[in-house]
Amino acid sequence: MKLPIASRNDAAFLVTSARALLRVTWARTMTPMIMISVVALVVLPMVFAAMFAAGGGDEVEAASFLIRRYDGLVGSFATPVIALLLGTSAYSAELEDGTLLYLVTTATPRWWIGAVRIAFAAVGTAALSMISVVGTGLIATGLHDPLQVTLAFAMSVVFGGITYAALFTVLALVTRRALVVGFAYVIFWEGILSQTFPGLHYLSVHQWMRAVASSITDAGDARLSDGVPLTVSIVGALLVLLAAVVVSARRLNEPRLARVSN
């Protein structure tokens, strides 16, 4: 992999370097194991949808089923895990073999390296999560979208996927044990603590996703009725994105990259 040589402030240089970074990130991330894991996460809710469709059900039952599967399987499990896999794999591999040291010695701005990596994980997570949601809805109810549940959660997982991707991508620069820390965050913070203590809803990406879904769907489900305001969710996600770019740039700008992997 060879990055272009040009002015750091040249827009054409940034675009060309982004393409090179994306090629490297794709090669580092899309290993057979990760691809199998991601496909399994995307398809799992569809399996439940096929079982529901085989049993039949009216519009109310369909809406309730979809909310449970979207919130429980996609929102709280598949989306964060996909973001964790896509966000940490490239940095982790490059820290191991020293490729990251080469990247930061090129003319590419540090913040641009971080932003491109975040964008890769964000777009990938959002797209895969949306495919899971839309596919599940189509299998369960066809083209009919009861109470706009599928639309609501499609927007919700795009929003959450981008936020989770930013969070987990920068996590790979903060610690070498990013996968372990990320899984602990998903299980304990998002899965247990934020569900147990309502005060933590304001600091939970999953709760922010519920706020997005609640603002779109007409379904009156308990999961969506006691969330945080939509404004808080949007502001929180923007702060996470901004902080991720800033922290990435600072970590990549350290004199010794060995510190990154401590």
Image (cartoon, rainbow, N blue to C red):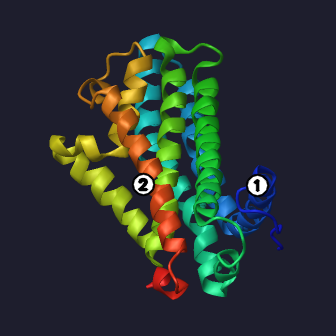
Position in image of residue 184 (x %, y %)? 35, 65
First reached walking from the N terminus: tag 2 or tag 1: 1
Q: Residue at x 58, y 75 (%)?
A: 92
Marks 2 and 1: which is nearer the front?
Answer: 1
Q: Quadrant of residue 25?
A: bottom right
Tag 1, which secondary structure? loop
* Disc ID at residue 189: none
Position in image of residue 163 (x %, y %)? 47, 46
The residue that mark 2 highlights is 243
Q: Is residue 230 left or right of residue 261?
A: left
Along the line of sight, the residue nearer the viewer: 229 or 128: 229
- Residue 192, compared with residue 260, is above or below; it is above
Alpha carbons under labels 2 and 1: distance apart: 24 Å
Q: Quadrant of residue 69?
A: top left
Q: Residue at x 43, y 41 (%)?
A: 238
Query: Does residue 19 appear in the picture of this structure?
Result: yes
Pointer 1 local density, CA inside 10 Å: few below 14, some 14–19, many at least 20: few
Amino acid of disc 2: Ala
Position in image of residue 38 (x %, y %)? 62, 55
Q: Residue at x 66, y 85 (%)?
A: 98
Position in image of residue 220 (x %, y %)? 32, 16
Q: Residue at x 50, y 15 (%)?
A: 148
Along the line of sight, the residue nearer the viewer: 221 or 5: 5
Tag 2, which secondary structure? helix
Query: Does residue 81 appear in the picture of this structure?
Result: no
* Disc ID at residue 10: 1
- Residue 236, compared with residue 146, is above or below; it is below
